[in-house]
Image (cartoon, rainbow, N blue to C red):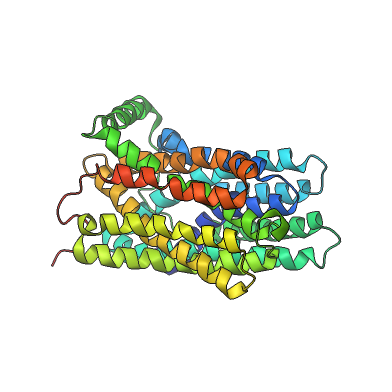
């Protein structure tokens, strides 16, 4: 096939919008849906945390995406599969055993989404010249964030509207997922015709598979031979130890009635406060974090970012202790915490880039993202049970105590002078 000359603006925004939606569905919308359908916080946190697993083990099968078929084929096929999974959720929500069935479908969706990430990021590098890759990196992240706002904001708001107009909660959420399914089928069809055909987008020939697998094993092993690998793994797993627990309980806390220690917001209000205002604050925090690191470097900003990602968690201590009724006050508190998370998470992203520097940069970065997902998965699994045992007030105090490992491991991290600073 000849390389298409199609404008990157015709496919990059939709490709990364499509990358963001299934992740938001699996990690956030599922939590809100299960909460509204009466599932306990213990079960919600435990079982939805398992959905991180495909992202944890993603580096293990990433070579096979290179070995079989083209990245273009994987993108279109996986988007169709994600659309089918969304439709499957919509069909099974009204069933008596919906929790078990939808979890299985969500796991299929998570696996497809993680594989789609591999194919999409690879296709991006194959379809664009190096200067174009740099020029469109901001477009990628922007449309990924738009997907988060669309998922956690607009779609949750729509579900809340349907809850008051449809015949049942199950019907409201079924309609929401049918809309999502239609969106993804449309994306797949669009990309089938719009995505370019890079000449370098081809599978690795079968007679070299053995060498590819050997190279992969050598590359994987070399990551664990890095200097200070124990500190590296500790930082990847512990930096977000508190946030991993908090993120699973934010939506349930906002939705739970005040008599149960929550704030009693409606689904629509959660879509505005957490899914829209919160995501915008998260995005602004991330953008500011990138700007300031470019000016002074990661070493200068590391401890400031460690403080900024952790200390605003105290906003939820305030919200749980005083249960304010002001919608604007609640929104401000959530925005402060999310802004701090976005700002402080920049240090984590730069740390992964720093650790990945060297001959196997792409593969080692993929391994880092696997440990990043594991660091969110394991604490999230017990967070719901813990909250059910001790209540929201004590749980958010525990979250603040859980920030201590993040401070301790940061003290052992060594950052080269000037890393991340923009060259003059």
Q: Is residue 312 above or below residue 213?
A: below
Closest to the observer, 394 or 418: 394
Identity of the residue drawn at 38% across and 55% down: 345
Residue 133 sits in which quadrant?
Answer: bottom left
Quarter-wise, where is residue 418 in the image?
bottom left
Tell me if residue 358 can be seen.
yes
User: Which residue is drawn at the image coordinates 72% and 45% (left, top)?
Assistant: 39
- Is 329 rendered above or below residue 210? below
Instruction: Indicate the position of residue 30 as horizontal and vertical percent values.
Output: 64, 51
In the rendered structure, the answer to whether residue 268 lies left or right of residue 70 reads right
Please provide percent x and percent y for residue 263. 65, 62
- Quick one: which residue is furthest to the right in this view? 167
Q: Residue at 36% of width from left, 51% of height from top?
A: 199
Q: Nearer the viewer, residue 249 or 214?
A: 249
Residue 190's spot in the image, x, y percent?
57, 61
Q: Is residue 340 left or right of residue 413?
A: right
Q: How many marks do you count on the picture? A: 0
Q: Quadrant of the C terminus?
A: bottom left
Q: Is residue 107 visible?
A: no
Locate residue 356 relative to residue 402 in the image: left or right: left
Residue 329 in picture, x, y percent from top left:
56, 72
Residue at 46% x, 57% y: name it.
Answer: 313
């Amino acid at each position: 096939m000849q390389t298409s000359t199609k404008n990157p603006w015709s496919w990059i925004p939709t490709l990364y919008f499509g990358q963001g939606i299934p992740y938001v569905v699996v990690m956030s919308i599922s939590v809100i849906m299960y909460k509204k359908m009466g599932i306990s916080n213990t079960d919600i946190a435990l079982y939805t945390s398992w959905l991180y697993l495909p992202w944890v083990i993603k580096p293990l099968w990433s070579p096979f995406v290179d070995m079989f078929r083209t990245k273009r084929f994987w993108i279109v096929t996986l988007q169709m599969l994600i659309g089918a999974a969304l439709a499957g959720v919509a069909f099974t929500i009204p069933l008596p055993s919906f929790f078990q069935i939808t979890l299985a479908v969500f796991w299929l969706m998570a696996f497809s989404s993680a594989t789609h990430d591999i194919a999409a990021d690879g296709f991006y590098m194959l379809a664009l010249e190096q200067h174009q890759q740099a020029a469109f990196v901001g477009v990628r992240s922007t449309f990924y964030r738009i997907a988060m706002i669309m998922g956690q904001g607009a779609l949750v708001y729509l579900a809340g509207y349907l809850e008051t107009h449809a015949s049942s909660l199950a019907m409201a959420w079924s309609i929401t997922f049918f809309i999502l399914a239609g969106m993804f089928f449309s994306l797949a069809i669009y990309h089938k015709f719009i995505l370019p055909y890079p000449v370098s987008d081809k599978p690795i020939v079968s007679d070299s598979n053995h060498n590819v697998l050997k190279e992969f094993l050598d590359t994987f092993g070399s990551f664990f031979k890095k200097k200070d690998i124990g500190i590296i793994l500790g930082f990847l797993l512990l930096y977000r130890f508190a946030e991993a627990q908090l993120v699973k309980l934010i939506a349930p806390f906002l939705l739970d009635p005040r008599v149960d220690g929550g704030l009693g917001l409606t689904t629509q209000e959660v879509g505005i406060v957490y899914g829209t205002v919160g995501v915008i604050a998260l995005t602004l925090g991330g953008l500011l974090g990138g700007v300031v690191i470019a000016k002074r470097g990661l070493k200068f900003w590391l401890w400031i970012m460690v403080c900024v990602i952790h200390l605003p968690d105290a906003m939820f201590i305030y919200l749980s202790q005083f249960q304010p009724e002001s919608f604007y006050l609640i929104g401000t508190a959530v925005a402060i915490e999310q802004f701090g998370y976005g700002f402080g998470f920049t240090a984590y992203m730069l740390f992964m880039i720093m650790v990945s520097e060297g001959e196997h940069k792409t593969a080692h970065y993929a391994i880092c993202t696997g440990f990043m997902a594991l660091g969110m998965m394991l604490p999230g699994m017990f967070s719901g049970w813990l909250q059910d045992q001790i209540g929201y007030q004590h749980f958010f105090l525990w979250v603040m105590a859980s920030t201590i490992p993040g401070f301790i491991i940061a003290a052992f991290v060594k950052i080269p002078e000037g890393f991340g600073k923009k060259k003059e």
